[in-house]
Amino acid sequence: MKPINTASGLPAGILRLSDIDLAELEGKNTAIARILGTREVRQALANILPDVLNVFAGDRRIKKFIMKLVGNYLNRSLRRPEDVFERAELSPLFDDPQFIRNLADPLPDLINGLFDLLGAAVETMEKLDTEDKKEIFGDLISKISTGQTGDMITRVCRILNDIHKNDPEFFAKRLEPGFKNWIESIDFGDLKEMAENSAADVRAFVTMANNVMWQYPSKVVLLLSLIPTAVNMLSDALNISVNRLNELPPDLLTDVILSFIKEIETRPLAGLFNELAEIVRKVHTGSALLGEPGAPQLPKLLAAKIGDIIEKADTVTLWKAKIALAETKASFDQSVSEAVNRHPDLKNLCLIKAPELTNIRMKSLNQRLAYWDGLDDAELSASLADHINAYDIQEIGEAINNGLRIFNRLGEEKPDVFSGAVDQLVHSIDPYELSEAAKKLFSVGDAMKPLARSVVPGLVKWVADVLRPVDDEYEEDARQARDALASLFSQKEA
């Protein structure tokens, strides 16, 4: 069969160079070619390639000569006459949307290809013997773990130390213009809108992740089982670290802790407390200013929110949960008590040492009272008077009145409640044990007599004075009390 020729004399399908679309030859994606064609990259390649070729040439003179010629040719070929103007050609590329699309197009393939390579390598390594796996990983780790990062960090620290010794605020001053521009360029309104608009998507993502995960319940259980493992690992790590710390002698360990405490500056801490206190005060004042007289805005808003939460909450389940937690705590306390009681030595030690905690608290209280007792009469009386006057006595009285009214209303509505409760309490107490306890308590009467003589006479006189006849609403009750006492004293023994 005779080949078909075109008018130019070339076989059909073969075009002259002038008819060829070079962009088509470059392929659909030309981003890399455009990057390589920029002045910045061409100049960098023109400076680097001769040295690279010289390294490849080795020590042989012929190769060095050839590579030198090639390097000079590449250097001349990569330069353009217009390069003397040093126009920026690389950065404008990134202003071109088509260039960005072309640049982004091969990235997924490159990333996926890299993961394919890693996956294939890991799959191949998985089939190897354990010794081969150890050898490969051992070589990787030993070649990577050369300590270079530690040396680099040390050198960076030295550099920063030198800079800060000369200029303590170096980075703050240098970063201020860029940080200011960064803040000014961010539209926090758009940022907030983005966060608000993302709420539904985030919830949908969490729902999707849970739906997918719970399709494999065994995997969820295995995932949750990592929590105890992580806790065990953390506990073991802390145990090792604390154990090494405990190897220090007491004086050295205490000296280290004291040094830490001494290095803590009190000025910023005090300033923090002051500022937080001022914020609380301003919020309270602002709440009073925004609300109506006697009704601050913040408590009102919090009450409304809490009310909404309570209306939407399942209170029955909530109380069941609270009761379950209380029962769990009681079971835990019982388990601790049983564990302690199974070891007599530990139980006796608890009985002996527990009062020492009370002693320490009493000593602390006594020291505070001793300080107050050390003040002069004027200062002590003024301070205590201010302390007592600071209490809202009227509110305390109202609280007592409300409690009494509730108590009396309950007694009037259901009088059997009190008698029933007292009856159950009385029948639940063993009279013999109570009698024996009272005998043992009053058997120390001689020891208590000095204290009793200092109190009882005044108490009896006060009771007698209270029961004297007075024309008031309680006189009838007082008269009955006087008659009862007269009957008691006038009654003769049988």
Image (spheres, rainbow, N blue to C red):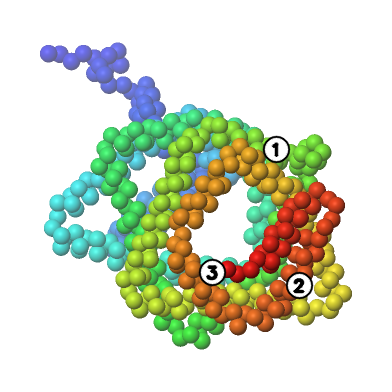
Q: Position of residue 254 (x, y in %)?
A: 53, 82
**Gap in Å between the C-alphas at discs 2 and 1?**
51 Å
Residue type at mark 2? Gly
Graded by Cα atoms within 10 Å as few (under 14), some (14 to 19) or many (20 or more), the crowding at tag 2 reads few
> What residue is rendered at 46% in x and 46% in y?
322
- Amino acid at circle 1: Lys
Outermost residue, right side:
378
Q: Position of residue 154 (x, y in %)?
A: 49, 71
Q: Earlier in the sequence, mark 2 or mark 1?
A: 1
Q: Secondary structure at mark 2?
A: helix
Numbered circle sitting on residue 300: 1
* SS for callout 3: helix
Measured along the vertical axis of the image, is residue 350 above or below residue 44? below
- Give the image location of residue 98, x and y in percent: 48, 28
- The residue beneath circle 2 is 458
Image quadrant in which the N terminus is located: top left
Is disc 1 in contact with disc 3, using a CB cutoff of under 8 Å?
A: no
Q: 176 or 32, which lies in front?
A: 176
Label 2 vs label 3, nearer the camera? 2
In the rendering, at what x and y percent does residue 455 appear?
A: 71, 74
Name the amino acid, label 3.
Answer: Cys
Q: Which residue is mark 3?
A: 157
Q: CA distance from mark 1 to mark 3?
A: 54 Å
**x 72%, y 63%: residue:** 486
| Figure check: 407 above or below 30 | below
The earlier-in-sequence mark between 2 and 3 is 3
Q: Is residue 17 visible?
A: yes
